[in-house]
Image (spheres, rainbow, N blue to C red):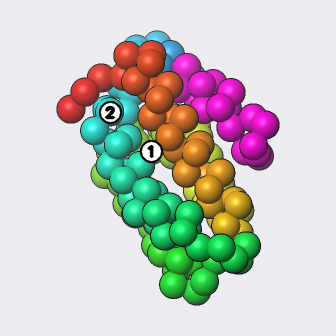
Amino acid sequence: MQVNEQNYVDTAEKVIMNLKNLKDKNGRMIQMVTTSKLRNLLTLTADIYNEVINQSEDRLNEEICARIEYLRVRFLYEAGREPSVKNLVEKADLLTVLKNIRGSRKSYILFNRYMEALVAFHKYYGGRES
């Protein structure tokens, strides 16, 4: 999935709608990721975003790039711990979006906005708490 400035909001909405209607192989509804789990992922991205937004160069420095790589590891870890997070990470293609940042300030800002859109649609469509 290619997320860009023109489609990230619509893409986030589609992801959340797909997760909301996701069923297992027996036709039972699968629990969607909780608001708190989703907000935890957003918090991880926001810490980096606060540094990126204050940087004027188009290319991110090595430290920030390393933190983005570690962010991929954290997303994988959280996905491994919780099936609902795994569904989100896979349906939203978050690992690919993170990989495609490739040191670009603009790409990281877009990624953060995509995460914010996922949280917003989750809340709008009644994502569960806890």
Q: Nearer the viewer, residue 31 or 8?
A: 8
What's drawn in magenta, residue-wise? 1-17
Name the residue tied to disc 1: 86
As drawn, is 124 to the left or to the right of 57? left
Residue 71: x and y in percent read 46, 66
Nearest to the eye among marks 1 and 2: give it: 2
Q: Amino acid at mark 2?
A: Thr
Question: Which part of the image, by quadrant, shows the C terminus?
Answer: top left
Name the residue tied to disc 2: 35
Residue 83: x and y in percent read 37, 40
Mark 1 to mark 2 CA distance (whole Å): 14 Å
Q: Residue at x 67, y 67 (%)?
A: 105
Tell whether label 2 touches label 1 (CB within 8 Å). no
Q: Secondary structure at mark 1?
A: helix
Q: Secondary structure at mark 2?
A: helix
Q: Amino acid at mark 1?
A: Lys
Q: Residue at x 69, y 59 (%)?
A: 107
Mark 2 nearby-residue class (10 Å; few <14, some 14–19, many ≥20): some
Give above or below for 22 relative to 80. Answer: above
Question: Which part of the image, by quadrant, shows the N terminus?
Answer: top right
Does the stretch in magenta take in 61?
no
As drawn, is 57 to the left or to the right of 90? right
Does the stretch in magenta take in 11?
yes
Q: Quadrant of residue 124?
A: top left
Q: Quadrant of residue 30?
A: top left
